[in-house]
Amino acid sequence: MPRKEHVRGGISIFGVLVIWEILARLLLENELLIPPPSSVVRSFWNLTVSGQLNKHFAATLIEFAYGFSTACVIGVVIGYFMGMHKRFDEIMEPWIATLYSIPIITVVPLIIIWFGIGMVSKVIVVFKITTVAIILNTAAGVKNLDPVWLELAKSLRLSGWETTYKIRFPGALPYIITGMRLGVGRALLGVIVAELMASNAGLGYLLRDSSETWDSPKLFVTVFMLAAMGLVSFNLIKRFERRMAPWRQSAEWSGE
Amino acid sequence: MSERTDKTISNLLKLGSIIAGLVLWHVLAVYVVNDPTFLVSPLVVVHTAYDMLFVTGELYPHLFASGWIFFYGFALAILAGVPLGFLMALSPAVRDYVNPWMTTLYSTPRIAFAPILLLWFGIGGGAKVAIVFLGCLFPILINSFYGMRVVNRDYVELARSFRLKPWALFVKILLPAAMPFVLAGIRLSIGRGLTSVAIAEWFGATEGLGYLVFFAGQTLNIPTLFVGVAAFAVLGILGFEIIRRVEAFVTPWRKGSQGG
């Protein structure tokens, strides 16, 4: 017996799709404004068979993966040192805060001027967004470590490296993952914006292409792909969070 | 080391970091890059900002255009998001029916909706307000929902034992208890709203800060580009601070609450 909330959720989604189909077919009859779900599905099938969707999806995914993974490594290292050394933290802080308060989208044109319209500029956009979130959270995690644990490390005579590896890092992990979670959503937005502005591949390009050629079914397919990508990445990181740091439900740096 | 000297050193380090960064930027721009279509010195940026603010005043029309779009979208998001969030918290049925759509729309990169909204509302103000609305809605909605749900059961029990009417229960107990979360949601949505303004103005606008930034980018007018980016940052920080003040004023019993 499925749970009540799932039944209702299913009804809600299915119901809206049916109403949409009926409205689009009978009342509006305007593919441009609101294509019925059936033509969206057909367009999805065509795009998949021709390999177009695959190509653009892969492009976005690769840009995202490169930027995100580099940001994780560099962000954690910088954040760790900021959390450990108060002076270093004070030196970095004004610049990190500045970077944090600038809406990403507005720097995208600048990044495109500097790094070209190819893949590099998108990787940089993802990198910038994710690193800032991870740095801030890692630093907060290292700073907020329970001093009792450090005393424990001392009384067990752990070496400096062991303290870092066995105490500080696991202690900061929930914060680091929160940083990643915050980074994912914004980075996804950033990469799409960058592709939309100047590129020749990726879902953002597809979005622009379909809206400029007034191909509404294709536009809706792209939007659904983006929604799916957002949902999947969000749920993956949530599951990852629960698995890696089950002892803390949510740790958040209180900036945004 | 006394606390006072420590504080002084800390401030000096921050100041030094800013100055060193600016000097480095200047040297890089003037002596290494030496290409005004690629990078300009911070001095040039400040000069341009001064011109645009006090000499030609060309920043103001853009500021107002963006300001209105932001204001309408933001206000509509509050008007729609708070009641809907409360309703979802108070009625499980509403929650279950709305939830799948909310999760989907929330985790989709916002820019995806821009072309569709543009198709529906045209390139005038309507589509822009709708884009900002959609950008601001979810943090407010989710936090209102969450705030109303986690109201302390003891308060509700207390109200029951005083035989408060449902309306009084809502106004006197539930609403104040949920308020910090609602305000936190509103605070979060400021940054998202500003980003949405930029997105909206990227799709066919003739004025506004977003337009300024993108037009400057396309014409390689780096000083103006920097000024536009800085204006966005300043507005974001300003809005954030204002809401923080409002929070301190409206909910003085609570310090720094965070939700969703």
Image (cartoon, grey):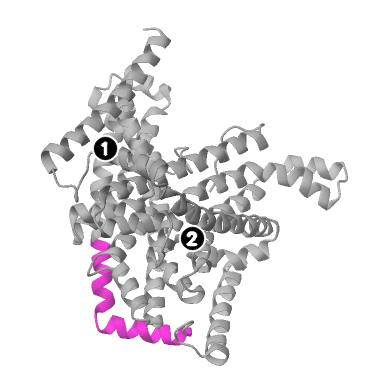
In the picture, measured across the screen, residue B4 lies left or right of residue B17, that is right
- Magenta highlight range: A36-62
Q: Crowdedness of circle 1 by 10 Å Cα count: few (<14), some, many (20+)?
A: some
Residue at left offset 37%, top offset 55%:
B212
Q: Amino acid at mark 1?
A: Pro
Q: Amino acid at mark 2?
A: Tyr
Q: Chain of mark 2?
A: B
Residue denoted by label 1: B42
Residue A204 at x, y percent in the picture: 32, 67
Please tell me whether the stretch drawn in magenta is mainly helix, strand or loop: helix
Whole-angstrom CA distance, mark 1 to mark 2, is 38 Å
Residue denoted by label 2: B106
**Front residue of B78 and B170:** B78
The correct choice, above or below, for B77 with respect to B2 in the image is: below
**Front residue of B35 and A144:** B35
Q: Is residue B151 visible?
A: no
Residue B211 in magenta stretch: no
